[in-house]
Image (cartoon, grey):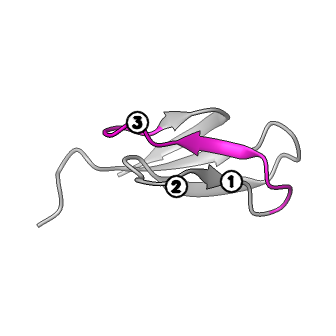
Amino acid sequence: MADSNSKFIKLRCTKCKNEQVVFGKSASKINCLVCGKELAAPTGGKTRVKSRILEVLE
């Protein structure tokens, strides 16, 4: 059963402006699919976001 606090986050890359949806508690580094810039990094809990958050999806 999924954790009720788990959410998806829509991010915008600060380098190429690509929009990407990521899991809020990811266990691996997330890079932009277009330019490869790091968008988010795992912390053992919530993801540390290194780009602009556009929307939190329920």
The crowd level at tag 2 (other Cα within 10 Å; few <14, some 14-19, many 20+) is some
**Could you tell me residue 31's position as x and y percent?**
68, 53
Q: How many marks?
A: 3
Between tags 2 and 3, which lies in front?
3
**Could you tell me residue 51's position as x and y percent?**
67, 34
Stretch in magenta: 34-47
Instruction: Using the rendered view, name the quadrant where residue 55 is placed.
Output: top right
- Is 24 inside the magenta-drawn segment? no
Judge whether 34 appears above or below 38 on screen: below
Considering the numbered disc 2 on the image, is that residue within a helix, a strand or a loop? strand
- Residue beneath disc 1: 31
Q: Say whether residue 40 is left or right of residue 28.
A: right
The CA distance from mark 1 to mark 3 is 15 Å
**Label of residue 4 in the image:** none
**Residue found at x 70% / y 44%:** 38
- Residue beneath disc 3: 43
Between tags 2 and 1, which lies in front?
1
The crowd level at tag 1 (other Cα within 10 Å; few <14, some 14-19, many 20+) is some
Q: Say whether residue 44 is left or right of residue 30.
A: left
**Label of residue 22 in the image:** 2
The CA distance from mark 2 to mark 3 is 15 Å
The CA distance from mark 2 to mark 1 is 10 Å
The amino acid type, in three-letter code, at marker 2 is Val
The amino acid type, in three-letter code, at marker 1 is Asn
Nearest the viewer among 57 and 25 is: 25
Cβ atoms at labels 2 and 1 below 8 Å apart: no
Task: Check the image and name the residue furthest to the bottom.
Answer: 1
